[in-house]
Amino acid sequence: DGGITQSPKYLFRKEGQNVTLSCEQNLNHDAMYWYRQDPGQGLRLIYYSQIVNDFQKGDIAEGYSVSREKKESFPLTVTSAQKNPTAFYLCASRTGYEQFFGPGTRLTVL
Amino acid sequence: DQQVKQNSPSLSVQEGRISILNCDYTNSMFDYFLWYKKYPAEGPTFLISISSIKDKNEDGRFTVFLNKSAKHLSLHIVPSQPGDSAVYFCAASEYNAGNMLTFGGGTRLMVKP
C-alpha cells in the first residue's frame, strides 16, 4: 500500500527539549512538505523540499529544522527556539498539483 | 494578508439538502484549485480540483465552480450526508511558483440527520 506515514501519532515534550517528527513516503514523490495546524486555523507551511538534499523555508520556519537525505524521508525537528510548538503537524508529498497528506502528529509541550 | 480566504468558519446543513462552501482568493496568478476534507486528528484528503481554464468540475455528489473574474470558487455537495461532516479546506496553486499550495482557513461543515 502506497502512502505517507508519520510517527508518533502523539508526542509530549518538556520545554527546552528538541524533538524530531518522522515522515516517510513510498509514493516515489520528489517533493515533500511540512505544515502546522493550530486549532480553528488553516495549514501553514513550515519547510518544503523539491528534491533530495535540498529544502527551503516556508512561511513559519523559525524554530524548526529539516533534512532530506533520502527521497523517502523528510524528518522535522522542533527545536527549543520554537516559542509555541504545541500544534498538529502534517507531512505531505506531491505529484503534479495534488498533495497527499500523512495522518499527522500532535505535539504537546508540557 | 491571506491570499486564500474562507469567510465562513462553520456551516450547518440538513441531511439531503445542498451544502455550499465558499472560497475567495486574491492572487490572479493562481491557476489550479483544490478542495480537501479533514476529519479531526487526521490528515486532509483530496476531494476535487479544478483548473483555471474551466469553470466547473463535477465528481459524483461534489461539484466545484470557479468564477475567475470574481476570484471566487465554491464547493457544492448534493445531497449532503452526515458522513460529510468535516472541515473543508480550499487550496490554490501557481504553476510558476513550483505548485506550492496556499490554504484557506477552513470551513467546518455539520450535516444534521
Image (cartoon, coloured by chain):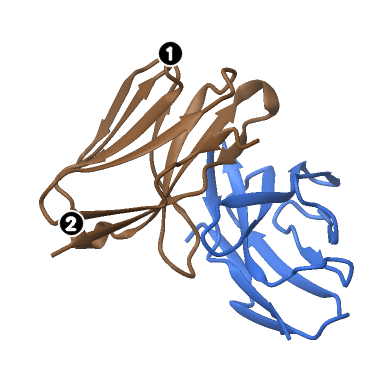
The chain drawn in brown is: B
- Name the foreground residue: B67 vs A65: B67
Disc 1 packing (10 Å; few <14; some 14–19; many ≥20)? few
Name the chain letter of the residue that bears numbered label 1. Answer: B
Residue A46 coordinates in the image, percent (x, y): 74, 52
Residue A1 coordinates in the image, percent (x, y): 47, 61
Point out which mark residue B56 bears: none
Q: Is residue A97 visible?
A: no
Point out which mark residue B69 bears: 1
Q: Secondary structure at mark 1?
A: loop
Q: Colour of chain A?
A: blue
- Name the foreground residue: A9 vs B69: B69
Q: Are marks 1 and 2 on the same chain?
A: yes
Q: Which quadrant: the C terminus of chain B?
A: bottom left
Residue A45 coordinates in the image, percent (x, y): 68, 48
Q: Which quadrant: the N terminus of chain B?
A: top right
Residue that badge 2 annotates: B81
Asked which quadrant contains residue A96, the reply is top right
Amino acid residing under circle 2: Gln
Residue at figure coordinates x 37%, y 17% from the top left? B54
